[in-house]
Amino acid sequence: MTRRRYFDPTRIGIYLLLILFALLFLIPMYVLLVSSLNPLSRFQDQSKLWRWPSALYWESFVSAWSGIPEKGLRACLETYLSVWPDHPGCARFCPARLS
């Protein structure tokens, strides 16, 4: 005996709520991605903030990685690599600490 599927208002409401929460989660991710691929000059006009870039601008990633040595991702990586061998849990993995 097969059950007949029907549209339950509760089920429709749950799916609409799930879609709403998914959009609330994905919209900031979209803005983050679009703003990282746009040049800084494009943000002077707020109407262009939500548009997908016509050409991808990778310079923001390059400047974040190789920018000022005391700031940015490069500094985080250098700090992590300089502190990690001194961590107590690293003794068996770090040959530099054993010597």
Image: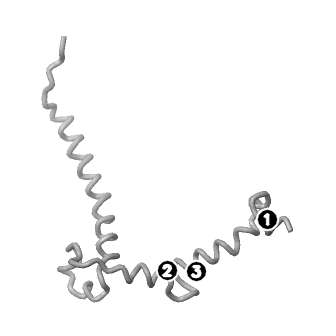
Judge from the rendering whether residue 62 lies leftward or rightward of residue 36; answer left or right.
right
Q: Residue furthest top?
A: 1
Up the image or down, 61 lies above or below 2; here it is: below
Instruction: Tell me where residue 13 appears, x and y as whole percent.
Output: 19, 41
Instruction: Tell me where residue 60 appears, x and y as whole percent.
Output: 39, 82
Packing grade of label 3 (10 A; few <14, some 14-19, many >=20) is some
Check disc 2 and give the amino acid type. Trp
Check disc 3 and give the amino acid type. Ala
**Quadrant of residue 58 within the rendered picture:** bottom left
Up the image or down, 99 lies above or below 75; here it is: above
Up the image or down, 94 lies above or below 81; here it is: above
Q: Nearer the viewer, mark 1 or mark 2?
A: 1
Instruction: Kindly state the secondary structure of the residue where label 1 is placed.
Output: helix
Circle on res. 65: 2
Name which residue lies at 20% across and 74% down: 51
Instruction: Estimate the spatial distance between the alpha carbons at disc 2 and disc 3, rounded to whole Å.
Output: 9 Å
Earlier sequence position, callout 1 versus callout 3:
3
Instruction: Estimate the spatial distance between the alpha carbons at disc 1 and disc 2, rounded to whole Å.
Output: 28 Å
Split into 4 quadrants, where in the image is the N terminus?
A: top left
Packing grade of label 2 (10 A; few <14, some 14-19, many >=20) is some
Instruction: State how many labels appear.
Output: 3
Residue linked to disc 3:
75
Packing grade of label 1 (10 A; few <14, some 14-19, many >=20) is few
Q: Nearer the viewer, mark 2 or mark 3?
A: 2
Q: Are marks 1 and 3 in contact (CB under 8 Å)?
A: no
Instruction: Kindly state the secondary structure of the residue where label 2 is placed.
Output: helix
Earlier sequence position, callout 2 versus callout 3:
2
Residue linked to disc 1:
95
Check disc 1 and give the amino acid type. Pro
Instruction: Tell me where residue 10 appears, x and y as whole percent.
Output: 20, 35
Instruction: Estimate the spatial distance between the alpha carbons at disc 1 and disc 3, rounded to whole Å.
Output: 23 Å
